Each structure stands twice: as C-alpha cells, then as structure tokens.
Image (cartoon, rainbow, N blue to C red):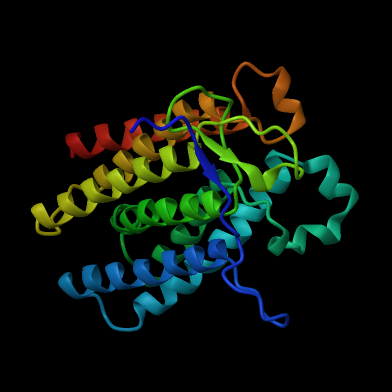
Amino acid sequence: MILNFVTWDVNPVIFDLGFIAPRWYGLLFAASFFFGYIIMDKFFKKEGIADGVLDTLTTYMLVATVVGARLGHVLFYQPDYYFSHPLEILYVWEGGLASHGAAVGIFFALYLFAKKQKVELLWIYDRIAVVVALSGFLIRTGNLMNSEIYGHITSLPWGFKFVRDFPVGAIVDPRHPTQIYEALSYLAIFAYLINYYYKKDAKTPNGYMFGFFLIGIFGMRFIIEFFKENQVAFEQNMSLNMGQLLSIPLVLGGVYFVWRSRKV
C-alpha cells in the first residue's frame, strides 16, 4: 500500500481535568532533562566526578535552556512585538522558544559552571553535547505533537496534513513533516556521539564531540530549513531565513573544534 499522505490530528493535550491539562510537548521537554540526567550520571560515575556536581549542572542547564530559548525567540524573531509587550516575554507557556537562543544560553551557563567547579570547559561541552542531541530529538517530537514548525506543501507520499493548525472545513495540503526530519537527524547524532564516547572509553579528544555536535545539529538544521515554512513574516524577503543565518557560525565553530581536537 502506497501512502498518499498522513492525516495528523493528534491532540496536543494528553488529558484535561479542568484544573490540569498536561501537554505532550511539556512531557517530552521534561523527559529530555530526565534522560539527560541519567546519561550524565553514568558519565560522571564512569569518570569519578563527585556526587552533587550533577545536581548543580542540572540547575544551570534548566535555567539556561528556558531563559536562552525564550530570549532567543524574542530577540531573533519578534523583537518589535515583545519590546512593545514586555510582560509577555515571561509567558513561556504560550510558546516561542528558539533553539539557537538555547544554545547560546547553554554555552554561557556551562562556562560559568566550569569556572565555578574548576573543570575543563571543552570536557563538559563534549559530554553535554550527547544529552542535548537527545533533547533535540524529544523536543522536535513535541513540536510534531503540537502540529507546529512544519514544512512546505509536498506531493511526497509521507506528507502530513496538519489539520489541527487550520480552520475546520479548510482545505489542508500535505506538508513536509520537518519536525520528523529534524528529530531523526538529532537521534542519529545522539547515537553516534554516545557510541563514540563508550568506544573511546571516555578518553575522547577535547572538543571533538562538541564540534561534531555543532556541525551535525546545525548543519542539518540549515538544510532542513529549505523545506520549512518561515516562522515570521520578515523571512519572506530573505534568501536564507533566520534559522539558517544563525546556524552558519555554529557550524563553522564546530569545524574549528573538530580541527582543533585533531591537532592537540
């Protein structure tokens, strides 16, 4: 049987009891920290890192991810709106998180963490890269459950009709499920990185895993953006959208760190 398209009509709310209505996106976002904690705990125990350090790191990561992702969306995508409605910057439950902003927030938070804990910065970047790649897979799956961040109209047999994002009765064309493209890409990067870590028995060259992460995650993001609908109106007049422009320096940074790791 050949698919013509997939009708996607999943309710983003898991259940609604009136006083509580958890969403799939929130569950998957929380799961990224849960599984990330388990993986980092294994890394830290394998490398003899003292108990308690991971709890501190988790706090840094949580704050950096939420604050960085929110400010990234505000500054990169809708500065005019949010500067006119500053209180709405705090309304993170209404959506509007940017992965590039999260990346900047995490880089800065890990710098502070490494300085306070007196650990090598690239050492912690390498290990965090593993769990962030897995988090990317889970969060993009959450975007799929929300029927958001999808692609252009397509005639390919795996196109998705995101019926919940259109008025009832409207004609809905199949679109590229770019959330799935990104999610599977990030899952593959996670699989490579964690396999590499254990293959090297934790004796990885400083910066290589971090560099590979930057090239893989933001290189795939750059490519997939060609299939994705623009997120904001001003991108209509751009040859490369904001997501692609922000990805370029991160990919170049990744190339530098991979090269550097080979030279040390």
Residue 25 appears in the picture as rendered = yes
Say whether residue 234 is left or right of residue 10: right
Q: Is 206 located above or below residue 11 in the figure? A: above
Total number of numbered discs in the rendering: 0
Say whether residue 226 is left or right of residue 204: right
The residue that appears at 36% across and 34% down in the rendered structure is 215
The image position of residue 38, as x and y in percent, is: 30, 72
> Residue 36's image quarter?
bottom left
> Residue 31's image quarter?
bottom left
Along the viewing direction, whichever of 8 and 35 lies nearer the viewer: 8
Dividing the image into 4 quarters, which one contains the N terminus?
A: top left
Q: Is 195 located above or below residue 211 in the figure? A: below
The residue that appears at 67% across and 81% down in the rendered structure is 17
Along the viewing direction, whichever of 63 and 37 lies nearer the viewer: 37
The residue most toward the front is: 1
The residue that appears at 25% across and 43% down in the rendered structure is 208
The residue that appears at 59% across and 67% down in the rendered structure is 23
The image position of residue 182, as x and y in percent, is: 43, 40
Q: Is 99 located above or below residue 91 in the figure? A: above
Along the viewing direction, whichever of 203 and 103 lies nearer the viewer: 103
The residue most toward the right is: 84
The image position of residue 8, as x and y in percent, is: 54, 46
The image position of residue 94, as x and y in percent, is: 73, 59
Residue 200 appears in the picture as rendered = no
Dividing the image into 4 quarters, which one contains the C terminus?
A: top left
Q: Is 188 located above or below residue 197 in the figure? A: above
